[in-house]
Image (spheres, rainbow, N blue to C red):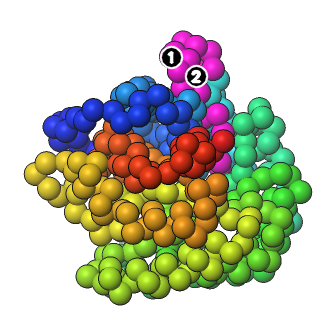
Amino acid sequence: PRGDWLSRRTELILEPDLPIIDPHHHLWDRPGWQYMIHDLLADTSSGYNIKATVFIQCRAFHRAGGPEGMKPIGETEFANGVAAMSASGVYGTATAVNAGIISHASLTLGAAVEEVLQTHIRAGNGRFRGIRHIAAFDDDALLNNPGNPAPPHLLMDAKFREGFAKLAPNNLSFEGWLYHPQIDELTDLARAFPGTPIVLNHVGGPLAIGRYAGKRAEIFPVWAASIKKLAACPNVMVKLGGIGMRINGYDFHEQAEPPSSETLAAAWKPYIDTCIEAFGASRCMFESNFPVDKGSYSYQVFWNACKLLAKGASAREKADLFFGA
């Protein structure tokens, strides 16, 4: 993210009093890129009524030692510590940071993942809500994240599903991050486990680079058909956002000026409208995916774009889309 470039666009805040829960953000301290509580609060205090946030798995502060399967417990310990910092009031009380926590547990451990889940629950102090085991994979190596390697057809793997079966008994959800050609595999998983809440991340990862470059018009109906089939599973919800990543093929970050909320809303409208029509507002929620998407636009501009996309929604629908109420 380039702060000097992002600061070149400021906008009047639309509907500043509308309560918002940001259900998808990260915190990390990586070489050359730090995004911690101060950075998040600088964004959440940019004019919106952000009541709370949900921390999502991002390999932050895994334990350095101990059994491999237990190392992700460090992320929950870290996220819960930040939540305690926020709850102390030292940083203000307007936003409850990390009110919910999603971390990682390798479901390929099968039934043995139970111990990992129980440890996460204890470490989360009531805030731990579920896990994300990233399944994003494509035959085009350009699209695969070496930091989160996934084998093909992970969601169909028998050992993975053995571990997945441990989520519902522990009242935990599953965050599904994958690419659009994999949505049908998530549908198969959702049908096999109708009692497990599943949250599709980033509108299902429509790809537009690598072997998918220049094929947006061709890919959209394929993506939309998969979204509609997935929406038939009542245990699945979808997060509306995360479309500012490089894989989505937009060039906002390459422009001389940062995009306006009108530009973002126009680009995303087909995807957002399709998801809301398929799932209904009660199973959709806008998400920032910050700081990942901060490379393309500011927090302020993002939420204005969401307000534009929800312009025709009723008060009840807006409560669902922004606050999850």
Mark 1, other Cα within 10 Å: few <14 / some 14–19 / many ≥20: some
Q: Position of residue 300 (x, y in %)?
A: 34, 37
Viewer-closest of 104 and 254? 254
Q: Are marks 2 and 1 in contact (CB under 8 Å)?
A: yes
Residue that appears at 72% across and 36% down:
127
Residue at the outermost left position = 256
Q: Quadrant of the N terminus?
A: top left
Q: Position of residue 106 (x, y in %)?
A: 70, 62
Q: Which residues are magenta?
A: 85-106
Does the magenta-highlighted stretch encompass residue 99?
yes
Given the image, on which type of amino acid does mark 2 rest? Ser
Residue at the outermost right position = 169
Q: Position of residue 120 (x, y in %)?
A: 76, 44
Task: Provide the residue designation for mark 2.
Answer: 86
Disc tally is 2
Q: Quadrant of the C terminus?
A: top right
Q: Is residue 117 left or right of residue 270?
A: right
Pick whichever of labels 2 and 1 is earlier in the sequence.
2
Under circle 1, the secondary element is loop
Residue 91 is labelled as: 1
How far apart, in angstroms, are the residues tagged by discs 2 and 1? 6 Å
Given the image, on which type of amino acid does mark 1 rest? Tyr
> Quick check: 130 above or below 83?
below
Q: Is residue 123 left or right of residue 183?
A: right
Q: Is residue 11 left or right of residue 192?
A: left
